[in-house]
Amino acid sequence: MSTPAVLRSAVALLRRHWQAAYLVSLTATLVNTVPDVLRQVLVWDDPRVLSALAVDVVGFGTALVAQLWVTGAVAGLADGGRPTRSGALRRGADLAVRAVRRAPGTVLAGVVCGGAVSAVLTIPVSVAALGWHRVLGPLDAPGVGAFAVASVSDLVASAVTLPFLAFVLVLAATGRRLTSTPAGQ
């Protein structure tokens, strides 16, 4: 299946299974919020760029785990099944590895599209709350309210984009084609 076809199919799956997919995504996002906030608080007033970079590396790692878990949990939805939380991380990791091996360009396109949506949802809010210097560099002790606003925008962006990339990974890994669309679409 071509990259544009996979992206369209991922959107179709998301539209078809939006309630289950977003519930799984929200669960992962809320669980990921704890380490996400803690990593920021640990370097709250540390002005060093190296600390900011270390926090970003940890954030990437926790986001990757969340993405793999969501991928494994929603994989069954592509076949009309239900979300399966048990064993989701291992299943998601297996699907992600197969997707990257089978269709790296498609995975990259999914990451870029999901990242673009995430950026639109979070960057303007974070910049308005924290300012460019804190978004791009160390937090340098922001106000608690500003930090909370930026954190909520990150939470929303994650919850919205995780299921899309999960479906891209499932489709790219399996080479599945959607054979039918629900009535009215």
Image (tube, helix red, strand yellow):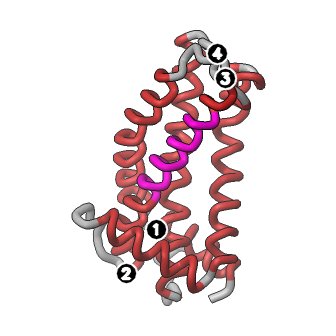
Kind of residue at disc 3: Arg
Seen at 34% across and 74% down, the residue is: 76
Residue range in magenta is 53-67
Instruction: Give the residue at mark 1.
Output: 16
- The residue drawn where x is 66% and y is 28% is 126
- Looking at the rendering, which quadrant does residue 123 occupy? top right
Question: Where, quadrant-wise, is the C terminus in this rendering?
Answer: bottom right
Q: Quadrant of residue 147?
A: top right
- Residue density around tag 3, few if under 14, some if 14–19, many if 20 or more, within 10 Å: few
Which mark, by number, is residue 140? 4
Res 7 → quadrant: bottom right
- Rounded to the nearest whole Å, what is the CA distance between mark 3 and mark 1? 46 Å
Q: Amino acid at mark 4?
A: Asp
C-alpha distance separating marks 2 and 4: 47 Å
Q: For mark 4, does the 10 Å Cα neighbourhood hold few (<14), some (14 to 19), or many (20 or more) residues?
A: some
Magenta-colored stretch includes residue 58? yes
In primary-sequence order, the first of circles 4 and 3 is 3
Q: Look at the numbered discs 1 and 4 and tell me whether their residues touch, using CB distance below 8 Å.
A: no
Confirm or deny contact between disc 2 and disc 4 (CB under 8 A). Answer: no
Mark 3 or 2: in front is 3
> Which one is earlier in the sequence, the residue at label 1 or at label 2?
1
- C-alpha distance separating marks 1 and 2: 12 Å
> Could you say which disc has been placed on residue 48 in the image?
3
- Nearer to the camera, 68 or 84: 68
Secondary structure, magenta segment, majority class: helix
Of the two numbered discs 4 and 3 in the rendering, the one whose residue sits closer to the viewer: 3
Give the SS element for disc 1.
helix
Residue at numbered disc 2? 79
Q: Is residue 71 left or right of residue 143?
A: left
Taking the magenta stretch, the answer to whether it contains residue 73 is no
Name the residue type under label 2. Asp
